[in-house]
Amino acid sequence: MAYDLDREALAPFRLPCFWGEYNSRAKLVPIVTLALHPRDIGTLLIGYSEGAVIYSFKQAKPLKFFHYHVPRGAPGGDADPASLSIDRNPKLTQAVWHPTGTFILTGHEDSSLVTWDPKDGRVIIARTLTDTHVDHPTPRATTFGADTGSRKAPLLKIAWCANQDPDDTGIFICGGASDLMPTRGLTFFEMGKTPNYTTSSWQVITEHFENPKRQRMIPTPPNVDVVNFCLIPRKTPWYAGAHDPIALIAVLSSGELTTLSFPSGYPISAVNQLHVSLTYVHPFIGAANIACVDRARWLGMTETRTSGPPLLKGGAEAAHPLKRFEDRSVIQTAHADGSICLWDMGHGDEIENGAMLKADVSRAVGRVGNVQVTRMSFSGAAGELAAGLKTGEVVVFRWVRNNYPGREPPAPGPNKPNELTNISERKDPDLVEGLHPFTLLQQQDGPVTALKVSDIGFIAAGFGNGTLAVIDMRGPAVIYSIHLSELSQKDKSGAFRRQSQQPQTIWATTLEFSVMTLDGDSYSSILLHVGTNTGLLVTLKILPGQGGRYTVDVAGSTTLGDAIVYIHPMSAASGKPAFASQSVVAGLRTGLRVDGVLLAVSKSDVRVFKPASDKGAHKSWDSRLCDAAAVSHCLDFGIALVCLFGDGSARSYSIPSLREIGSVKLDHILDVKKFGEALITDSGDIVGWTGPSQMALVNIWGTGQVL
């Protein structure tokens, strides 16, 4: 069938199944591949599951049929001893033209590669990746591999590549490797100059395809197979996109993508080479977070990285309104290969800085494997990114310039346990300016469960076994470390609780820095609020000490009904956020006073109170459990609390009365089981998972249309 691109509909043109003319017994033979002649658009190569056909549009008839037959006694592609005594007709999987149209190459399920003469339909040679003449009886078979008789993968895709000279070719193959081979991914036959068909003998042509100049095994990620690939040509899309390839994108059996250089096979970073949507599977995302960054600061955060020529060229971006939000929603995604990507998610407006930033956690910790990021936090004002790992490390990146770009750093030394390690020498030599490793804390107390980077030079981290650590980045130095079980045994008045009322393990679930006046104080101070899995909310006071260092003291605590999922400090007078910003902290020297309240959301209730006491408004979620929450700006009407619940609904509540404003069902859009990993921005955008590797963005305030 043909499709009319102008009318966007199927054209009346139809071609019947021609394989019935070759084999009258064949019924419903599926088409597996189509390929136009590279030099004659009027000739089409049709690949059926049983063989290939050359069809001429000019003559309106099939010209040649190609049917691969393995006679009795020949090993075939799979070299199965049990099938040597029978005739076989391996099914076809691929059919491609030589770049000049002089020859045809077909691939088959038994991993046979068959080269044909399209003029008379004869087989020039049938071979596998390691064996030749596999369609001949065993005595004539030439074996230069040791995998005869082993199980081989079917040929999934073949591309006949051409250099600048279309007669200088190579064959790129996906599949066909033996299960005994250490890597079963991609193979490249560098064929060299093709013999002249008119003046060369049959033996010369046969030897050309029998003995490639070079055979390369393209390295691919371990424990997965390549199931498909897409070649990226250097300049033109000629020869079915295989004209002088510069790189390739491979599809892995796990569903992930990997980009490799061609034909060397070196991994290529997808940063600023592919669209951000492809980074979700390049490789898979393990964690995500969102940070609000000042627009002017984000416009200046454009990394300088040495890279090859761009893979994608051309195209026209769609026009978007220039809303010029002062705060940009910068999303951070942690991938399975130990990398973190940062990019502007936008507000449905024109993205002024569409470049992507990348931080290499694997390089920072000094190892390749076992790098699973569980928590991330980014401060645009401080230019710092922190990543918490499942193995217990906290890695801090800082926006700096590499004074020695292109120079590979020395081998990383061991990370110091239970203290900070200077990792500034582990810079990426290809990154001239960007997020470089700065310091590392190896706490060795379970995975990182909560992480917060402030705008004022402090980082707080909570660990799975209950430890809380506070880092002063002016040293850097760990200025505070305590096990939360010590705090859970005391209530706000200092009395000890009964140990049976608390579970064995307590850990931090959310952290937030603020500047406000505590109940009973006459001045404002820097505060750290720690929410835990037991509902305990602890407020710590950070004060300047002797020698320029800061001290951390416990100011008080209160208890909510369940695990705390969100903490938001705000001004009691205006409702604006009371985060610890650089301008507010600078005002403390002149006696600035911030009268604030704290909004804390747990799975079972929400509370608005003046820290560190538990006075204020309170609301229970009744039969629902809250998985995620955030304070959002409701257009021009003020602020509201937006919550995602386990029943698949998103609900908004007024502040401070906590009265429900409205609700909407999102279970038909987002995966309710992953509501706990959803992200809610201050502009009302909800970024949630719709599947294992796909996210959707929904604005809670909407446009009045039905979701």
Image: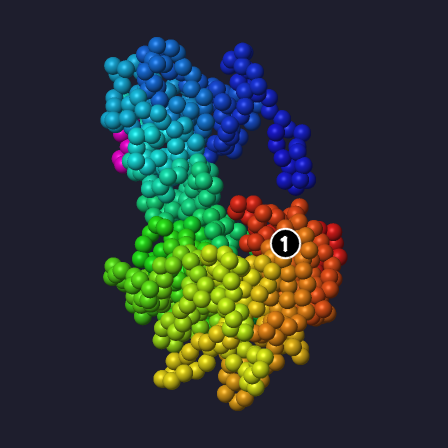
Specify how the rendered protein is coloured.
rainbow
Is residue 691 on the magenta stretch? no
Q: Which residue is mark 1?
A: 625
Q: Quadrant of residue 475?
A: bottom left
Is residue 212 on the magenta stretch? yes
Q: Residues within 10 Å of mark 1 (few under 14, many from 20)?
A: some
Does residue 67 lie above or below 463 as drawn? above
Give how far across and how far down residue 373 sits, in percent.
Answer: 43, 55
For image coordinates 35% across by 35% down, the residue present is: 184
Give how far across and how far down residue 477 sits, in percent.
Answer: 36, 73
Q: Quadrant of the N terminus?
A: top right
Q: Count the labels in the image.
A: 1
Task: Please tell me which residue lies in front, 182 or 442.
Answer: 442
Give how far across and how far down residue 232 sits, in percent.
Answer: 43, 45
> Is 45 left or right of 348, judged from the image as shown?
left
For image coordinates 59% across by 52% down, the residue present is: 675
Task: Please tell me which residue lies in front, 464 or 137.
Answer: 464
Residue kind at label 1, given as amino acid type = Leu
Residue 509 visible at all: no
Does residue 595 lie above or below 210 as drawn? below
> Is 3 left or right of 315, judged from the image as shown?
right
Residue 446 visible at all: yes
> Is 395 left or right of 685, judged from the image as shown?
left
Give how far across and how far down residue 446 sits, in percent.
Answer: 40, 56
Task: Please tell me which residue lies in front, 614 or 661.
Answer: 614
Tell me where the magenta segment starts and ends, as one range. Answer: 210-214
Does residue 650 lie above or below 383 as drawn? above
Judged by its main secondary structure, the magenta piece is loop
For image coordinates 74% across by 54% down, the residue present is: 705
For image coordinates 63% across by 54% down, the residue present is: 625
Label 1 secondary element: loop
